[in-house]
Amino acid sequence: MWFFNSIFGKIFEFIFIPFSKMNPWIGMAVASFLTGIFMLAIFRWTSNQEGIRNVKNKIKAHLLEIRLYKDNLSLSLKAQGNILRYNLKYVGYSAKPMVFMIIPIVLIIIQLNFWFGYESLSKGQNFILKVKLKQGYNPLHTNIVLKPSSGIIIETPPLRIEEEGEIDWRLAVAEEGSSNLQILVNGQSAIKTLTVSQNSICRISPIKVQHNIFQEILYPGEPPIKKDIPIQSIEIKYPQKRMNLFGWHIHWIIAYFILSIIFGFAFKGFLKVEI
Amino acid sequence: MSPFNRREFLKLGLTGGCLIAVGGSQDIITRVFGKAETPKKVIILGLDGIDPHLLETWMNQGKLPAFQKLRSQGDFRPLRTSIPPQSPVAWSNFITGTNPGGHGIFDFIHRNPENYIPIFSAAATEGAKRTISVGDIVLPISGGKVNLLRKGKAFWQHLEENNIPATIFKIPSNYPPAVTKQRTISGMGTPDILGSYGIFNYYTTDTAKINEDIGGGRIHEVYVIGNQVEAKLPGPINSFKKDRPEASINFKVFIDPIHPVAKIRIHDQEFILNEGEWSGWKRVRFSMIPTQSVSGICMFYLKQVRPEFKLYVSPINIDPGDAALPISTPKSYAEELEKRFGAFFTKGLPADTSALDNDVLDDGEFLQQDDFVLKERVDMFEYELSRFESGLLFYYVSSTDQRQHMFWRLIDKEHPSYDPKLASKYGNAIENIYIEADKIVDKALAKVDKDTILMVMSDHGFTPFRYCFNLNTWLKENGYLRLINEWKQGQDSFFLNTDWSKTQSYAIGLNGLYINQKGREAEGIVPQGKTKETLVREIAHKLESFKDPKTGEHPVLRAFVAKDVYTGSYASEAPDIILGYNRGYRVSWASPLGRIPKNIIEPNTEKWSGDHCMAPEVIPGIVLANRKIVLRFPALYDLTATILEIFGIKKPKDMIGQSIFNLRRP
Amino acid sequence: MAKGKVKLDKDLLEKVKKYAELSGYSSMEEFITHCLEKEIAKLEDSDSEEEIKKKLKGLGYIS
């Protein structure tokens, strides 16, 4: 799974790195544009273009019929019935491309969340590191050591919450640069990446998870924790990021959907896609 | 000029502390007024409570180089303060250029003559007049509002009329901020989100050592179960609900079983604190009904983890980024500062003196908190200075006042609360804040050019508060106030044990004394006219003659008869006598709210040990300027006249002061 | 509706009767209920004394 995740992740890195120092809206526009084009392409290849065209023409014809024969009640009603019928048919034609689209879109959203969902840390900022142990391991009776790379300071002793099988620390960024956190449990080590950056967009992986297909699909940001280490997950609480739209702070996914749809409609004629 | 935007403020207002729904009631423009270039510029630094004696002493010792430099460039004079010398009164004198008869603020606390109950003098809130009820939800359909009770026109409103821009930063007695297009943010008088002068919350497993009924705070007994503490942060009254319950937020604290560290989880926020650490500002949102909530900001302080758990939460300040009440003009000014600096103290008196007084915070912890206040002020001052180009900038500092109130006991060996051990540790707290103030003056001096007039002023000075004078007890002992049950003396506040049918005079507030006047007070017995006049003079004379049997001193240095000292349209609303206490004496803790203890004089054993609610001649303020001051005994209202003169504005008739400079002289 | 009895002074009762009729109330109960509701509303509008005390106390100058 990690092989697929890392390749997929690299593609996104390749796309976003040129825009990492620019206003996040530029990266967002690029992502939305590519998504719009991608959706159009899937739609074109997986849908019955001829059928859609026909259905749309039929709907138009019946709309015209209603206008022309507005004095004839029975014809009007019949036309309305036909419109409804062809609308349903249209929905039917759209269903197939939707099915093809849904999985790649979910995977794209998961990746985009790494780029637009969180603020990276900066010098002077502190943050919480949460380590959850596997079931059956008590944080009070497990030997856990945290070793951050240079530039990261541990500000609090480990805070162990027995009930939740969790150990928390507060750490702070003393120096900028790439860093990681090494967590040793009973002598075995797991590494969690940490993003400290001044770039306006950068890739942030908040959680590292155990080997588990579903978990790895949801949190594909870094290789999973080795199976024999008794850690369930390692999480860094990054601040949530919002897109600034004239002073309004909106969630990136709203911006993403709206822009993708706009791009999709703008380029459907150019790509000769019947939607 | 852009059209006025109807301000949607006070969706959730405070009625004397209760949240009520109110609608737009004040027109605020969205952009800041005045881009006019002025030939002269004025910077005024208002350092609350700076005392001329201390200032001169430390200036002469070379500890305050910036003050010294300013004195050498221009002048330094003691500044005549207001009668009485309380901050809201004094600053109102400065704001309006009048005496209290002109602005109607006579004390921190006024009274309602209809029921003898103390009331806030600064602001009054009106609830929504019309509401509709849906189930147990009450929805407002007409707006309520908060009214500024200070009357008279503020000097920045005069400047506005003459197209001169001004920024007024946290001047006291301006909550809610007077309607203006100038950039202003309210200071002293601004409530917390409960509508109070500040109520902290303290969560502890050890309630035995603390009196639960303490002023300015709520003590919550909590239990540590499985290394976890569950608690509630109380918020404002939810007036959207019929039975007006208190809104609250549940939060959880996770404690490490061995290490002195805890994690607090409130809403979806989590933060970890070591023992003895402050959290910085945390935003909390109280939900009222699904579409309405009130946002506040507060700081958590993990005082102790073990053996007893102790967590302090500061009074919840109005969130400047999403203010539920009007704190600035334009509204965007507070938001702009919040964006640049993050959340900041909005409550009028920011440092929590009540927490120190009640041993919830110790001296060091209080100073840490006040350092946060000071740092914010300095950062914002630098910002305002950097963009100050024309007109007037007024900037206010509160820490000078609050630290002198709390630490005088450590520089005054005669004070009943003097503690040599603490004095060796914190005895320089007052000197240090003067040194910090000096650094602020230095920043201002660096900005001054030949066209800039810099004035540094305080509203009053400071003096020890060693003995408490129970004014109502004195009235009772002298036959002017009668009790219903003698044996109950000292138990009730609000004159509950007072026989009004035989009471001629009573005292409410910090310096005021009222005659129980027929036709004015609900159960008044003294007829207006000659009888009252004779009684007033008699009481004033007797008060001034009274001697403290222990020290032989006169606790009351001056008993001012209001009609002798006040002029202006609101003079008739004043207390009948205003007391000016002698050095070392002040009204007691109990008397201002109508409690009548047994002894007339008691030692002041509180940490609140320095004060200024004395006779004005005992505690003048200061004025320093980079110009020669020609007026021999300048007063607060003279500074207002000076501002207008600098900008060439004709002094209005109701202003009583005169310019302290002779600007026409080359 | 839950009902309860309240004792009133005889003179007062007479007065209540008289003014209830004069003011056009349909019954004494209605008049008394109206008066009580009005008074209670007044009290509910104003803060309790304790509430006032608490709020003022944060000021620092009083206790």
Image (cartoon, rainbow, N blue to C red):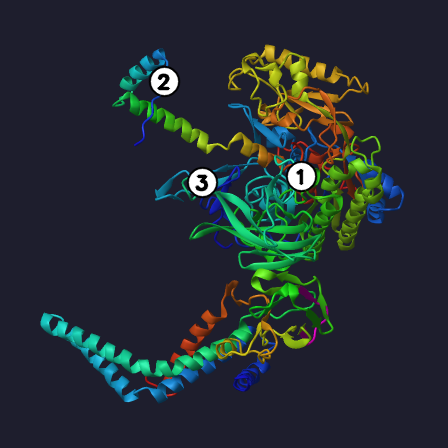
Nearest the viewer among C16 and A19 is: C16
Label of residue B244 in the image: 3
Determine which residue is flagged by label 1: B354
C46 in relation to B134, above or below: above
Q: Amino acid at mark 2?
A: Lys
Q: Secondary structure at mark 1?
A: helix
Are there few (<14), some (14-19), or many (20+) residues within 10 Å of tag 2? few
Q: Main secondary structure of the magenta part?
A: strand
| Callouts 1 and 2 in the same chain | no
- Residue B608 position by quadrant: top right
In the picture, measured across the screen, residue A90 lies left or right of residue A36, that is left
In the depicted view, which residue is nearer to us: A46 or B571? A46
Give A213 or A18, whichever is nearer the viewer.
Answer: A213
> Mark 3 against mark 2, which lies toward the viewer?
2
Dividing the image into 4 quarters, which one contains the C terminus of chain B? top right
Q: Secondary structure at mark 3?
A: loop
Same-subunit check for callouts 3 and 2: no
**Which numbered marker is on residue A19?**
none
How many marks overall? Answer: 3
- Amino acid, disc 3: Arg
Are circles 3 and 2 on residues that touch, CB within 8 Å? Answer: no
Position in image of residue C1 (x %, y %): 30, 32
Residue segment shown in magenta = A170-183
Confirm whether circles 3 and 1 share one chain: yes
